[in-house]
């Protein structure tokens, strides 16, 4: 039979086996949870796929019928079909600066500098030639975030030194 020491060894071995079994049970639970999460993700993806397939079928049907969900905005007949080029006044066509360092750099480069004691307008080199060329190819819009009053002053200054071709300010 078993004596006291043998029983303690058997109990210790049983506890070890029980711990191993508990670890395996825990691992199985984690795997089960992972499998359930994967099944949920697969179900969601399946629904997304069905929706995408349905949308694809609708797009193909619309294309075959000559209709589309995405229609370009019609161009009124009185608007010429020339492409439009939008240029930013400050930073693209000229630099409008308030620092003395920028003023010195522009003068060192030989660029014309216009303006007052606090603000200087530094046109890009070749500005007039650039605008003459793009005006032949595009309808040009000059955009700026400045106020209307300030843009008029900048355009007048650029025009006064011959940086703008005729009609840019009024056009």
Image: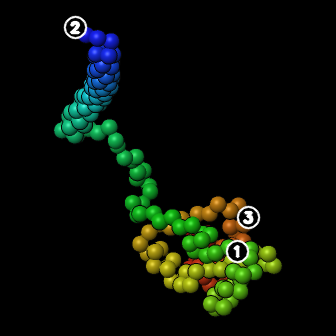
Name the mark on residue 97: 1
* Quadrant location of the C terminus in the rendered image: bottom right
Circle nearer the N terminus (1, 2): 2
Check disc 2 and report the residue beneath it: 1
Q: Quadrant of residue 60?
A: top left
Q: Classify residue 28 as left or right of residue 124.
A: left
Q: Residue at x 75, y 81 (%)?
A: 100
Measure the alpha-carbon separation of dots 1 and 3: 17 Å
What x and y, as percent, mark residue 50? 24, 28
Q: CA distance from mark 2 to mark 3?
A: 110 Å
Q: Nearer the viewer, residue 150 or 55?
A: 55
The kind of secondary structure element at disc 2 is: loop
Task: For label 3, count other residues whose C-alpha is less than 10 Å away and answer few (under 14), some (14-19) or many (20+).
Answer: few
Circle 1 packing at 10 Å, graded few (<14), some (14-19), many (20+), is some
Vertical placement of 155 versus 101: above or below? above
What's the residue at 69%, 80% (across, down)? 102
Q: Nearer the viewer, mark 2 or mark 3?
A: 2
In this rendered view, identify the residue nearer to me: 130 or 14.
14
Q: How far apart are the two marked residues, 1 and 2, measured between alpha carbons?
A: 102 Å
Q: Quadrant of residue 94 in the image?
A: bottom right
- Percent position (x, y) of residue 52? 26, 33
Residue at the image point whose x is 39% and y is 60% from the top:
81
Query: In the image, what residue occupies the spot 44% across and 55% down?
Result: 78
To which residue does mark 3 refer?
149
* Discs 1/3, front: 1
């Amino acid at each position: 039979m078993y004596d006291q020491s043998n029983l303690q060894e058997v109990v210790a071995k049983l506890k070890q086996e029980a711990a191993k079994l508990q670890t395996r049970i825990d691992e199985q639970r984690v795997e089960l949870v992972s499998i359930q999460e994967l099944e949920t993700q697969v179900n969601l993806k399946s629904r997304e796929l069905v929706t995408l397939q349905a949308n694809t079928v609708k797009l193909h049907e619309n294309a075959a019928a000559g209709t589309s969900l995405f229609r370009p905005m019609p161009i009124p007949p009185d608007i010429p079909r020339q492409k439009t080029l939008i240029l930013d006044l400050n930073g693209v066509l000229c630099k409008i600066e308030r620092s003395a360092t920028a003023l010195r750099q522009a003068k060192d480069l030989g660029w014309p500098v216009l303006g007052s004691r606090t603000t200087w307008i530094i046109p890009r080199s070749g500005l007039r030639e650039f605008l003459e060329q793009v005006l032949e190819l595009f309808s040009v819009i000059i955009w700026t975030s400045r106020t209307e009053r300030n843009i008029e002053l900048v355009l007048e200054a650029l025009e006064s030194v011959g940086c703008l071709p005729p009609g840019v300010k009024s056009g």
